[in-house]
Image (cartoon, grey):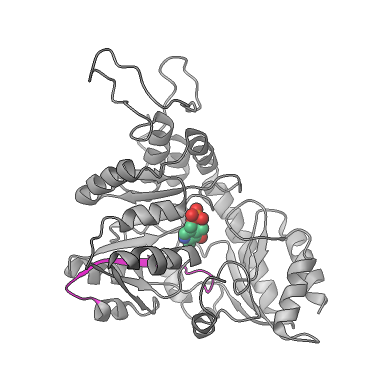
Amino acid sequence: MKTQSKQLETLAIHAGQMPDPTTGAISTPIYLTSTYVQDGPGQHKGYEYSRTQNPTRQALEANLAALEGGSTGFAFASGCAAATTVLHMLRSGDHIVAGDDLYGGTYRIFERVIKQFGIDITYVDPTTPTAFGEALRPSTKLCWVETPTNPLLKLCDIAQVAEICKRKNVWLAVDNTFCTPMLQRPLALGATMVVHSTTKYLNGHSDVVGGVVITSDDEVAERLGFFQNAIGAVPSPVDCFLVLRGAKTLAVRMERHVENAQKVAAWLEAHAAVERVIYPGLPSHPQHALCEKQMRAPGGMVAFVVKPGKKSALERARTMLASTKLFACAESLGGVESLIEHPAIMTHASIPPAVRQKLGITDGLIRASVGIEHVDDLIADLAAALDRE
Ligand SMILES: *Cc1c(COP(=O)(O)O)cnc(C)c1O
């Protein structure tokens, strides 16, 4: 990279990339190779085998590390692979404190994969930073935070939790998938690691599944590097190329996602069929002030609860999701196209009903990933679907 800029818009396009040394190609080539020819045994150019090193992956890792303001990035085959590799840094007998409103797949890794190795997890309310401190034990190695949470868009004060973790020498991992570094930079707020599902906004075009972990902590970087190679859940060079290309437009995409989401949220809040809108950019959000302090902008995700129609809230939600034409009824988020889903039936079905009820993932709750289509079309689509009850 020739640029010395620290501006995220510039880094997104240039960081980690340089013209190909052989041809001058401006785009980083897709190095589809499993191995590299050595001049003699052990005489190589820093590349031995593609699980260990791959130039396309390295460009992506350097790019995303620069955006998050970290020293090192590690790319993975999915966000879940990224999380699982981080959790391999723990040992039997260690303890984790995590926010209680997590991506369903992360919750499943904690409950059904990590626990069976003798690692214990305590869940706390992410809106109360002191709850993390109170849950710490001498064996606590890691705190895990998502903010905004999924699907209820609760915020966690990263700087305050980081302070608590630092005092006790506990790592803090922040899942920054919903914000991307364009809207929130957890390392600057004191987190040890940032985790992403690059499947979402970072790639942004709904055509890749991937993950990344970024850190500036040398010890964590060394261990993550070891586990990335040893476990081997690495992404293909083609996927790395696609995420690298997606990241180039991240700044402009996020701007439009936020602009559209803000308008959609305000429109929903004024609609008679809507009981409640949850969006950190609305003054009605209980943590609106923290949003203004911690996030550059409130993001592209909007959650809302529909009132019961002629039948129940569940039926109105079902009808609405079957009726939208632009908002596709689908899991996932963060792509250019708008998506809409029902957490209780779809993304969060793996959470036991009693736990869902306690958290507020009710029958009337709908989550929308607001895309970058024209906002008038998006609102017209929601209006027509809400009219059918
Ligand atoms: C999607 C998602 C993940 C998991 O990522 P995959 O790429 O689907 O494995 C983790 N955290 C959040 C917040 C997500 O939205």
Lateral position of residue 302 relative to residue 16, left or right: right
Residue, x 28% and y 43% (percent of image)?
A: 225
Q: In the rendered image, is residue 48 in sight?
A: yes
The structure residue drawn at horizontal position 46% and vertical position 26%, both measured from the top left corner, is 31
Q: Given the current orientation, which residue lies at the most extreme front position?
A: 116
Taking depth in this image into account, of 50 and 361 the one nearest to the observer is: 50
Specify the segment rendered in magenta: 136-152
Q: Position of residue 230 (x, y in %)?
A: 30, 43
User: Disc count in the image?
Assistant: 0
Please give the name of the residue rendered at 23% of the width and 68% of the height, measured from the top-left corner: 165
Is residue 195 located in the magenta-colored stretch of the structure? no
Residue 242 is drawn in which quadrant?
top right
Residue 187 seen in render: no
Would you say 8 lies left or right of 167 here?
A: right
Position of the C terminus, as image quadrant, is bottom right
The residue lying at 28 percent from left, 25 percent from top is 46
Residue 214 percent coordinates (x, y): 34, 49
Residue 251 in the image, given as x and y percentages of width and height: 52, 48
Query: Between 91 and 357, which is closer to the camera in this rendering?
Result: 91
| Image position, residue 127 (x, y; %) | 40, 78
Query: Looking at the rendering, which quadrant does residue 84 occupy?
Result: bottom left
From the image, which quarter does the N terminus lie in?
Answer: top left
Q: Is residue 190 left or right of residue 212?
A: left
- Residue 369 lies, with reference to residue 64, above or below; the image says below
